[in-house]
């Protein structure tokens, strides 16, 4: 690597770190405010809030890295253009494609960082976040089951427990569910207990009765039961969830997904396969963004008013690439055989940057000949 390449690469990496830090901080603050209100409202400590926010950081960083790469590339190119450093290098015989070589190195470095994030850190953090949320939900459920108090966890639900023994057994339970506009159901039980399940916390009622009053015709149906299980997810929020989250699956599991895994996650097979290939293609969007930011600012002559037109054109090109990515996803998730469309956006971005580099080189030829 030549001295010029190392110089440009160091400038790109320095500005990339700055822009990434700013974007992550802005996005993280917006997410942290709502998370803080929810956790503190549930009685959680600041340590739990810090743990949850740290687990969300890998996904936040993944989303802002392509934008940070584009911003760093455009900013450094604009500064080099204003200080005539690019003009000097072009005068020594460097073509636009030669000038873009350190930008390509920079884009590949960012792609490697994103590859680690998308395929390793983000799935691991989402798995840990899911397990932590399930534990918090179970703790909140246990705290809200207070004896001797009528509780209204959500609208239409009334819960009363006369006593809770030292062993955790619930005595004399009354539960009324009036969320159905056509009927109201009341459960009474002499005893019960709280059960932890992979699908979330369950309230098990033993030796009780269910009374359902139909509002149409005012009919009352009475059912006696020896034991009855009531799902508390709708009262206190979902727990662990019986289904696995596709975001916690490894890339290999997604690439080799079958119908059994699709049924387990509740997702379509084509969506799982698309997500697996998208984890391999998505990092190269950062490479395309860096090259677009550099090549767009090479077009046009020097102006005292700056390169705002070229910067606007580069932003439009970046938006176009993202629109292609969204359109390809909406088509590709319909059929598992259409997964190659996942590479449409990165290849379009690279092709667009190559066209811009060729066009900028074509514009400089008449001026060199006249000189």
Image: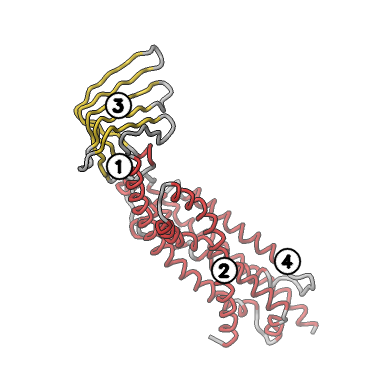
Residue extending farthest to the top is: 217
Residue 94: x %, y % from top left: 65, 83
Residue at which label 3 appears: 187
Cα–Cα span, label 4 and label 3 = 68 Å
Nearer the viewer's eye, disc 1 or disc 4?
Answer: 1
Residue 107: x %, y % from top left: 53, 71
First reached walking from the N terminus: tag 1 or tag 2? 2
As helix, strand or loop, the secondary structure at mark 1 comes to: strand
As helix, strand or loop, the secondary structure at mark 4 comes to: helix
Residue at which label 2 appears: 69
Cα–Cα span, label 1 and label 4 = 57 Å
Residue 166: x %, y % from top left: 21, 42
What count of labels does the image hold? 4
First reached walking from the N terminus: tag 2 or tag 3? 2
Cα–Cα span, label 4 and label 2 = 18 Å
Residue at which label 4 appears: 308
Residue pictured at 53% horizontal, 85% vertical: 1
Cα–Cα span, label 2 and label 3 = 59 Å
First reached walking from the N terminus: tag 4 or tag 2? 2
């Amino acid at each position: 690597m030549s001295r010029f390449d190392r110089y440009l690469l160091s400038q790109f990496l320095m500005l990339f770190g700055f822009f990434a830090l700013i974007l992550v901080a802005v996005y993280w603050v917006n997410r942290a405010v709502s998370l803080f209100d929810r956790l503190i409202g549930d009685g959680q400590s600041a340590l739990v809030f810090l743990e949850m926010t740290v687990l969300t950081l890998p996904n936040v960083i993944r989303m802002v890295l392509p934008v940070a790469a584009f911003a760093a590339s455009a900013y450094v190119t604009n500064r080099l253009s204003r200080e005539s450093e690019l003009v000097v290098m072009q005068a020594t015989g460097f073509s636009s494609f030669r000038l873009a070589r350190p930008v390509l190195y920079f884009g590949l470095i960012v792609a490697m960082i994103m590859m680690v994030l998308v395929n390793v850190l983000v799935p691991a953090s989402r798995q840990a976040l899911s397990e932590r949320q399930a534990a918090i939900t179970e703790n909140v459920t246990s705290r809200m089951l207070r004896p001797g108090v009528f509780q209204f966890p959500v609208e239409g639900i009334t819960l009363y427990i006369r006593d809770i023994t030292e062993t955790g057994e619930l005595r004399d339970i009354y539960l009324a569910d009036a969320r159905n506009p056509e009927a109201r159901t009341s459960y009474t039980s002499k005893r019960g207990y709280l059960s932890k399940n992979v699908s979330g916390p369950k309230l098990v009622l033993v030796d009780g009765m269910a009374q359902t009053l139909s509002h149409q015709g005012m009919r009352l149906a009475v059912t006696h039961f020896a034991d009855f299980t009531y799902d508390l997810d709708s009262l206190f929020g979902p727990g662990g969830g019986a289904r696995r989250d596709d975001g916690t699956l490894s890339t290999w599991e997604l690439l080799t997904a079958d119908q059994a895994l699709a049924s387990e996650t509740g997702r379509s097979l084509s969506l799982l396969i698309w997500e697996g290939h998208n984890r391999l293609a998505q990092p190269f969007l950062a490479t395309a963004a860096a090259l677009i930011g550099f090549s767009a600012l090479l077009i046009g002559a020097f102006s005292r008013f700056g390169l705002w037109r070229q910067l606007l054109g580069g932003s439009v090109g970046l938006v176009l690439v993202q629109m292609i990515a969204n359109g390809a996803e909406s088509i590709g998730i319909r059929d598992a055989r259409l997964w190659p469309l996942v590479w449409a956006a990165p290849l379009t971005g690279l092709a667009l940057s190559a066209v811009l580099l060729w066009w900028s080189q074509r514009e400089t030829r008449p001026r060199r000949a006249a000189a």
